[in-house]
Amino acid sequence: MKKGMGLVPRLFYGWRRGMKWIGIFLAVSGPGIIVMIADNDAGGITTYAATGARYGYGLLWFLVILGPVAYFVQEMTVRLGAVTKRGHAEAIFDAFGPFWGWFSLLDLILTDWLTLITEFIGMTAALSIFHVPPFVTVIVVSIVMFLMVLQGRYWTWEKIAMLFCVLNLVYIPCAIMVRPSVSQIIHSGLIPNFPGGFNNQLFFFLMANIGTTIAPWMIFFQQSAVVDKGIKEKDVPWSKLDTALGSAFTVLVAGFVIITTATVLKGVAVDSAAQAAVALGGMNSWLGTFLAVGLFDAGFLGAICISLASSWAFGEVFGWAHSLNNKIREAPWFYGMYILLVGSAGAVVLIPHAPLVLITLFVQVIAVTLLPAALVFLILLLNDAERMGSLKNTRAQNIISVTVVGIIVALSTLYGVSALFPDLLR
Amino acid sequence: MGLFARIREINERFRTPHVKMTPGVKIALFLLRIYLLLLVGILFFKFFTVVAGM
């Protein structure tokens, strides 16, 4: 901008520059927002609904803290993906050798597959409220998921996923409809406190909220998505903004789920989000419908991201073509893996008397074996000055990330162990 | 190429870890091994407890 320029040219110049920035952001954004909103998957919505019903607005402050925590973890995947042009699975193989590579890959596949089953459980439960039989839900969802990747462009897949992300905001009108007390939210929700005192049950809920906010598949998904989208080092600041916005959205949505159940279901024992939707539907049919639609959407978003995280990881390590920009005949193994994961997970839900509760328990435990490893590798890789150059972790970033990872590892381990031994924390 | 041949090829390709094995990296990997061994131990303990209780 030239000195002495008039007001109108200045405004025009500013507007042009602003539009250019928005254009760049829109082109780069996607992986961060999608991974963060998909993080509020079926299991996450259930946890938030149960938290609201049990503790009212009391733990909203904790979610506000979890937002930046999720951001610090995920932004590292952005830098790593942009610099190395490798997904997390391949990066682990390359940096730490086959032992840690196979451990991470096989653990990821197992965790993802089990989590995928829980997403299908959530989706079938949500649509059963509208009297849709589970087999119809599983078949239709599988076909839609297949069609989403079949069109052969990452860009198209991402934009469809973003549409489902927008649908996740349905919890906002839900919360407004139940007319919560804003002053009560501010006073009892946003000021850190431990409702009923710090006891074992509260600790279990805190850990469950951490477990749903930071999941191993998120690290693998975002790094692979950054690579598949072709994010370059110069785009990293925009990609970080994308991740920050996503973490803000995830906290917002989770907060509104808690506000909804805290306002109208406080004191009710909520075991699943579908149960909460039925209970709310009894009060106001629109409310129940919104919650059920939100639950289905959460499960669907989780399912599309989780299945892709695994397929990308396998493709990277096995050296198959593994981009959503590939046509199916160009990357048959990549798409085959995707279909196999989706189809088998959906089929498990349809097996009569399948041990679905046991599977849900197992997800928590198996994820705990993978999360610390993935996080430790992430920090070690981010400190590899030879590879990362100027984007390696600074001292301040290391202090923050080691602290965050240490706390997550400790709490998620306790969560996993307490899932195995429920009496431990009672 | 068969699956096992492919796995062998992958093991060969990634045989040499490329991260610089500083004392910090070695300690982190060692602690990770201990952590995972403990966790797997707990899992086995739980499994045998459940089986024994059947």
Image (tube, coloured by chain):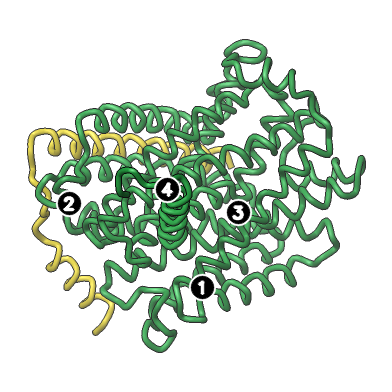
What's under tag 2, amino acid-wise? Phe
Q: Is residue A144 above or below residue A69?
A: below
Residue at image x 92%, y 40%?
A283
Give the green chain's letter: A
Name the residue carrying label 4: A10
Mark 4 is surrounded, within 10 Å at the Cα level, by few (under 14), some (14 to 19) or many (20 or more) other residues, namely some
Check the residue under mark 1 and report the chain it is in. Answer: A
> Distance of mark 2 from mark 3, alpha carbons?
31 Å
Residue A96's tag is: 2
Residue type for callout 1? Thr
Q: Position of residue A236 (x, y in %)?
A: 31, 51
Amino acid on which disc 3 is placed: Thr
Residue A405 x, y percent position in the rendering:
34, 33
Q: Going by the picture, which residue comes out furthest to the bottom? A: A329
Within the image, what quadrant is residue A270 found in? Answer: top right
Q: Which chain is yellow?
A: B
Q: Looking at this view, is A105 or A291 the one in front?
A: A291
The residue where tag 1 is placed is A156
Secondary structure under the numbered disc 3 in the rendered image: helix
- The three-letter code of the residue at mark 4 reads Arg
Label located before the other in sequence (2 or 1): 2
Residue A115 against residue A140 in the figure, above or below: above
Mark 4 vs mark 1: tell me if same chain: yes
Residue B29 is left or right of residue A407, and the answer is: left
Of mark 2 and mark 4, the one earlier in the sequence is 4
**Label 4 element class:** helix
Label 3: chain letter: A
Task: Name the N-terminal-most of marks 3 and 1.
Answer: 3
**What residue would you read off at disc 3?**
A118
What's the distance in space between the residues labelled 2 and 1, CA to CA? 35 Å
- Give me the chain letter of mark 4: A
